[in-house]
Amino acid sequence: MRGPVVVVGDTLLDRDVEGVVNRLCPDSPVPVLDETSAVDRPGGAGLAAVFAAAQGADVVLVTALADDAGGARLSALLAAAGVRVYPLSLSGSTPEKIRLRARGRVLLRHDRGGASGEPGQPSDEVLRVLATASAVLVSDYGRGVARQPALRAALAATRAPVVWDPHPRGPAAVPGVHLATPNESEVRELVPALPGASRLATASRGAQGLRRRWRAGAVAVTLGGDGALLCHAGSTPLVVPTPGSAEGDTCGAGDRFAAAASLALAQGALVSEAVQAAVAEASAYVAGGGVATALPPEQPSPRVLRAGSHRGPASGHGVAGPGGERVGVAAVATLLAEVRGAGGTVVATGGCFDLLHAGHLATLQAARQLGDCLIVCVNSDASVAGLKGPDRPVMAEGDRARLLAALSCVDAVLVFDEPTPEAVLSWLRPDVWVKGGDYATGGPDAVGLPEAEVLRRWGGNTVVVPYLDGRSTTDLIARSAGGQATGADGRPPQPVGVTAPASTTRERTR
């Protein structure tokens, strides 16, 4: 494949709540579910992207994320699955689908998130990645991403094969898609059936009608456990049966089908070959237990947050005490809404901030001057230990977050568990990302900011501000242990207020 597989569409936050029912509610004759476990996962286009990434593909997801706890949770889940997110802004709330289950059966589905929000404009980087894709899957869940005019123009212009998984509330496929993949019920909504027509006749008539209406190369109607019916330029449809019995939980089977077909087309398969591969994949998926077994199991600690918790991707959120009201995803979401609503500039920076010192303060003060708010992303205790070793951090994340939030130059603090801030950045979408140190000094050994590629996805910028030589946590720890702290040149640190010359030592203030 010459480029990534790009998935475009609406991402939802799905949550499966498993429990036990052994009594009825005393004030109403309804079962009471005692929750025993809960699992969050990306839904909609996000699930299709996770399926493609699980097959080893380089996957980019173009989707809209809201400034709320659900959006933060989705960013973390997608990053953990190896999906590169190119986010659009989303007004309103993250759509959520919560399934209440007992003994493997769904008792009730609870949807929340309200009416569809308006997705923002795609960046130049989004349009570029669509132009260089090896295949594109549009996973439309009827919430607006597939309607975005600039995205539709880019989808119509790409040379990559396009698979369109439609939704009855969504727009028509752009002209010229290689393959559309509606299911039976969607075909019946989009093309009314003739009275008394057989199942296959209805599917065939609907597929041919959609193919002509959308000027699509082919339409494959998925038939559940009976496989799929493929209509293309010829007058005779191709029926692709399932290779065996496929009974079980079908949640996500359509996404698995569309993802498998897209991967096959990206690898050069014919449309008929892609549909056969997709039927086999979807059948094996259902027979194997569906989404509960197809995705890698979560390894949540008490720190991992759940949908609707009003917290972010790690546990330092909602910290009580001084500065606590400015720590966590709820505080950050409120700040983002205020600043963006006023047309302001969002600035963010990040790091461990273990033993807060003058170098940190200089970076934070300089960063705050670049916009209308400063959000500090702090590595959690687990993240610091993974990066620095088992003896770090010296200060627990709650204390580090409180100290930072108490600074007048800091507007909000967010703690994250991952080794890098990619997931947090995909949710925050800051206009400016700031690092303190000597990245990009222009010297022959200068190293670019690793976050720069992430910021380009939504048109953000990365900058470096000067650091104070010799102010490093490692030196402070060494000095407290009886060692001699030095600057990068081996000399004692310069007085406060003196900026060191550029060197090749990276991230001196962290």
Image: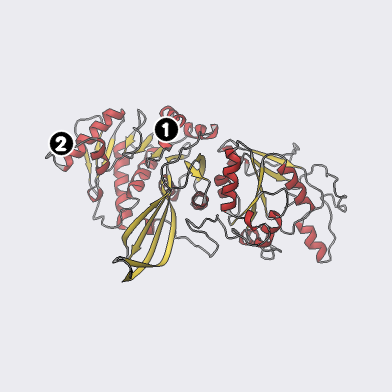
Instruction: Locate residue 397, reporting x and y percent.
Output: 65, 61
Residue at screen point 27% across, 41% down? 186
Residue at screen point 50% across, 62% down? 300
| Helix, strand or loop status at disc 1 | loop
Residue under circle 1? Answer: 160
In the picture, measured across the screen, residue 185 lies left or right of residue 485, that is: left
What number is the disc on residue 329?
none
Residue 48 shows in this picture: yes
Name the foreground residue: 265 vs 339: 339
Residue extending furthest front?
27
Name the foreground residue: 118 vs 505: 118
Residue extending furthest left?
196
Q: Amino acid at mark 1?
A: Ala
Instruction: Locate residue 73, reporting x and y percent.
Output: 50, 53
Is the residue marked by circle 1 packed among few (<14), some (14-19), or many (20+) residues within 10 Å?
many
Residue under circle 2? Answer: 194
Q: Looking at the image, is mark 2 or mark 1 earlier in the sequence? A: 1
Name the foreground residue: 496 vs 5: 496
Which image quarter: residue 403? bottom right
| Helix, strand or loop status at disc 2 | loop
Kindly indicate whether the residue at mark 1 contacts the one at mark 2 (C-beta within 8 angstroms): no
Q: In the rendered view, would you say 198 is above or below 331? A: above
Residue at screen point 25% across, 39% down? 189
In the picture, measured across the screen, residue 377 lies left or right of residue 257, that is: right
Tag in front: 2 or 1: 2
Q: Amino acid at mark 2?
A: Leu
Residue at screen point 49% across, 53% down? 77
Instruction: Locate residue 436, reporting x and y percent.
Output: 73, 46
Is the residue marked by circle 2 packed among few (<14), some (14-19), or many (20+) residues within 10 Å?
few
In the picture, measured across the screen, residue 455 lies left or right of residue 362, that is: left
